[in-house]
Amino acid sequence: MKEKPWYETSFDEFYLDLDKFAHSPEGSRKEASDAIALLGIRERSSVLDLCCGQGRHSIAIAEFGHEVRGLDLSKRMLDAARAHQLAAGVDVTWIHADMRDIPAGLELDAVLSLYQSFGYLEHRNDDLEVLKAIRAALATDGRLLLQVPNRDAVAKDFWQSRFTLLPDGSHLGEVRQFDPASGWLRLTMTIFRDGSSQRREFRIRLYNASEIEQMLISAGLRLVQVSASLSGAAFNLDSDRMVVVASKVT
């Protein structure tokens, strides 16, 4: 029996456990606000939060008055998203699907892929298929916002391992491996708590800005802007992340 891809099994209670330490509601709301401002979309726009996880950005965008859909492959993440949505009292449509399988006919004003999820799939062509699916889902004047790690910065200042004390007194160990030929970054994360440990492996294919631009062109999208952050900071070699805004070529 073929082994499931890592991204079908790793987004579970382990990930939710870490996520509560990594992101605050206030921080998620600020990120969502900055993303919407950077895109420059009008009020009550139709927005897809691609690979939405537990919906921290989807819900914040809905609170700003937009029509929001959140798509994710993990049923556990979507269950958490629905619970958060119920507590927030906003309307969000949740879609259980692979990021390559965005439903047809949406005519979206914006697609957002925030934090990092682009690059999880097995092959470079899979990533290209994601961009093509995004283009097909966008309205004529729709825009994409794509946030990804910056390969150049990761390679330039590479760290292999680190150990972090978490707020609840447990410890997080992280070990990274980077293959410059394929672009794969492998991260093994281990939580040590109460004399026991839990481990998960995560992988992402990294790209630099010029590679992203070429993929956008191949998918029928046009690069509009590259920033270092959602607030629009200038992008350079040392930027940990890049935030790409692209439009649909018609």
Image (spheres, rainbow, N blue to C red):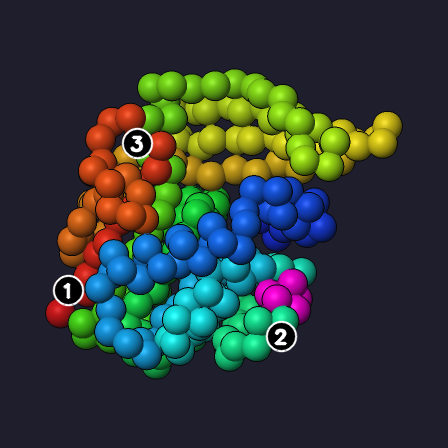
When asked about the image quadrant of residue 163, the answer is top right
Q: Position of residue 122 (x, y in %)?
A: 48, 44
Magenta extent: 78-86
Q: Identify the residue position indicated by label 3 in the image.
A: 239
Q: Quadrant of the C terminus?
A: bottom left
Front position among marks 3 and 2:
2
Residue that extends furthest to the front in the rendered view of this protein:
26
Q: Identify the residue position indicated by label 1 in the image.
A: 249
Q: Identify the residue position indicated by label 2 in the image.
A: 86
User: In the image, is residue 119 above or below residue 170?
Assistant: below
26 within the magenta span: no
Q: Secondary structure at mark 2?
A: helix
* Mark 1 crowdedness (10 Å alpha carbons): few <14, some 14-19, many ≥20: some
Between residues 89 and 237, which one lies in front from this camera angle? Answer: 89
When asked about the image quadrant of residue 99, the answer is bottom left
Residue displayed at 48% across by 45% down: 120
Gap between marks 1 and 2, in whole Å?
A: 37 Å
Q: Amino acid at mark 2?
A: Leu
Q: Give the mark nearest the N terminus, 3 or 1.
A: 3
Q: Is residue 197 left or right of residue 59?
A: right
User: In the image, is residue 88 above or below residue 126?
Assistant: below
Residue displayed at 56% across by 42% down: 22
Residue displayed at 27% across by 60% down: 37
Q: Position of residue 195 (x, y in %)?
A: 86, 28
Gap between marks 3 and 1, in whole Å?
A: 28 Å
Between residues 246 and 192, which one lies in front from this camera angle? Answer: 192
Work out whether residue 6 can be spotted.
Answer: no
Q: Give the mark nearest the N terminus, 3 or 2.
A: 2
Q: Amino acid at mark 1?
A: Val
Q: Is residue 196 left or right of residue 144?
A: right
Residue 223, numbered circle: none
* Mark 2 crowdedness (10 Å alpha carbons): few <14, some 14-19, many ≥20: few
